[in-house]
Amino acid sequence: MNNISLPIYNSLNNANKKLKGSFHALPIQNLGKTKDVVVSEDFNARLSKVKELELSLTSPFFDSLTDPSKAIDESANILKDMYGSDLSLFVTCGSTISNKIIIEAICKSSDKVLCQRGVHQSIYFSLKAQNSDVNYVQDLICNDDAYIYSADTQGIIDALVRAEETGTSYTTLIINSQTYDGVCFDLQEFLPVVCERAKGIKNIVIDEAWGAWSTFDPKMKEKSAIQNASILSKKYDVNFIVTHSVHKSLFALRQASIINVFGSEDCQTKVVGSHFRNHSTSPSYPILASTELALSHANQYAVQYSNRISEQCEYLKSFINDLSLFRYLSLTLEEEYLIQDPTKLWITCTTKLLSGAKIREILFNKYGIYVSRYSHNSILLNLHHGISNELIGLLANALCEIDKKYKTKNNLLNINVGDIANSFYILYPPGIPILTPGQTICNNVITKINQSIFDDTSLLIVEGN
């Protein structure tokens, strides 16, 4: 074995050693990196045993995911009561398979489907495989700098109403209720309008992959999918099917997903049948166990996590705005029926010396802090359940050090055409100065400096002769 190259194992192992915490997803990866990640040590102890549950036992000694009658069936019924749904199903292959299960169950080639453009790729592929008659409603850009998009909520409603008026009603609506970028539907306001004005709608599919946390959050649950689906399904005789990617925001292993159905017996039967056809016959027991643990834990401690995240968010906003080169970016949502995700925080850098990509690299390579989403001058923080106060402190310290390091050089960027340079201004690559001390600054130089932030080019400023 010593002579065999193990690039995957070694790369992951090295990255894990460096990692102090992630502001992306998968809260479980932050356990053990900083103190007090979870609010219950009992949960920690149980979760630590999950990796030992990679077993090959089936019925009658354990159970079968595709035909549950014992522990899995009992747990699914507990979840059904927790969510108030008519059917709850475990998925250990991720929300990609969850979406395929749902679409194969309810979308036939003869059905008319209206779909928000900004949905996961698996929904596109599944709809194409079903040969469904699909119309897409283009998303709208709500922030040019960070390329953040939101649903065209009015466009969706208008399309549904037009179809009703022409006698060609849509049978199914598919939306992505919470984006990773931090834009959420206010489903408490949006869904009743849909149900009232689109009488022909039979199914509403809500991909809430990033919003498993919001079901339990006291400030968000009334705006999110589960509570509204439970109320509106019976009132309007519409089937609601909701997917959650549990591992993205709660303490479950990767690929943990849940499907909740609110609707008719026929709809439930079709979803169960599709689950049987599409799910792996060898489900991951550790993922199953971690899903059960994560959802139970979130249900029990939702208030504590919600309060912690709110406090962390307010602290970071205040701290960031006190720095010289960073600012908190608030999203401007002009569309009705949209709200900003309270767990997402955009940080914008105001200096041309740093790009979003550069900040991301510095945070991980020097401080062991991982962020995923960035734009040319911004980074996104996802304040999920796995973000401890200690990790917030590490991030604040890192941003403070970066701010101090680049503040002096940033002051040297206050130059105008006709000024005399007193420093070297070097674009790397290629490493050739575009300005040297004593040189008169021209418009071409200013243009190159301004453009560097968009070209993934580093601008180095070195004082001296």
Image: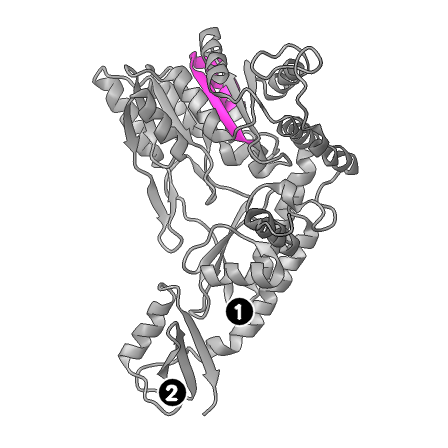
Determine the image quadrant of residue 218. Answer: top right
Kind of residue indicated by mark 2: Thr
Kind of residue indicated by mark 1: Ser
Q: Residue at x 38, y 26 (%)?
A: 174
Q: Is residue 294 left or right of residue 207?
A: right
The disc at residue 436 is 2
Question: How many marks can you see?
Answer: 2
Q: Which secondary structure, mark 1?
A: loop
Q: Nearer the viewer, residue 195 or 387?
A: 387
Q: Nearer the viewer, mark 2 or mark 1?
A: 2
Res 320 visible: no
Counting from the top left corner in percent of width and height, residue 239 is at 44, 15
Q: Is residue 285 left or right of residue 196?
A: right
Q: Which residues are magenta?
A: 227-245
Counting from the top left corner in percent of width and height, residue 133 is at 27, 22
The disc at residue 324 is 1
Counting from the top left corner in percent of width and height, residue 210 is at 51, 36
**Magenta span contains residue 233:** yes
Q: Residue at x 42, y 84 (%)?
A: 424
Q: Residue at x 47, y 83 (%)?
A: 462
Decide which of tag 2 and tag 1 comes sooner along the chain.
1
